[in-house]
Image (tube, rainbow, N blue to C red):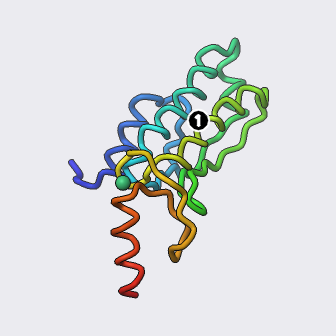
Amino acid sequence: MSNDPQIEFVEHIKELFPEIINEKGFSIEVGPGWFHIVEEFIGEIYSQYRASANKAEWLSEFEINSIKEKFGRLRVQFWATQDTEQIRAGYKILNKSIVTCEKCGRPGVLRSDLLWHKTLCDEHYEFAKVDFLRM
Ligand SMILES: [Zn+2]
């Protein structure tokens, strides 16, 4: 059993959505404050998979790779040839990351005056500023 919250979260996601998560090359590199957004996003995609008439075909047209933070936002790298309207529903969920602190999940703001863009609550923003000034 690992104490790394990211590794534990990846295991949790694989257990919840085993069919659509590729064992190889799948990674989640975001803070715990965004875990619930990742779970909701994959859950949305998963419900589309469950509803599809031909599951083998659906899977052959979908692959999810890395989930990471980029410029303060939650980014999911995947390819899919499914109906783009369905995939768009997933993107709406990802947009919650720009109003959610990546560290703790409380309401956050996209901060652009740090070394890197980060979406943080007031408290974690203060911590980040102190770290930034020490550099
Ligand atoms: Zn926070």
Up the image or down, 47 lies above or below 97; here it is above
Instruction: Tell whether 62 sits left or right of 18.
Output: right
For label 1, the SS is helix
* Residue identifier under label 1: 93
Q: Position of residue 66 (x, y in %)?
A: 56, 52
Q: Position of residue 3 (x, y in %)?
A: 22, 53
> Who's the residue at 72% across and 24% down the image?
57
Q: Position of residue 76 (x, y in %)?
A: 60, 48
Residue 112 quadrant: bottom right
Is 135 in front, or is 65? 135
> Who's the residue at 39% across and 48% down the image?
33
Q: Residues within 10 Å of mark 1 (few under 14, many from 20)?
A: some
- Type of the residue with mark 1: Ile
Residue 13 quadrant: top left
Q: Residue furthest bottom?
A: 135
Q: Quarter containing ligand 1?
A: bottom left
Q: Position of residue 50 (x, y in %)?
A: 58, 17
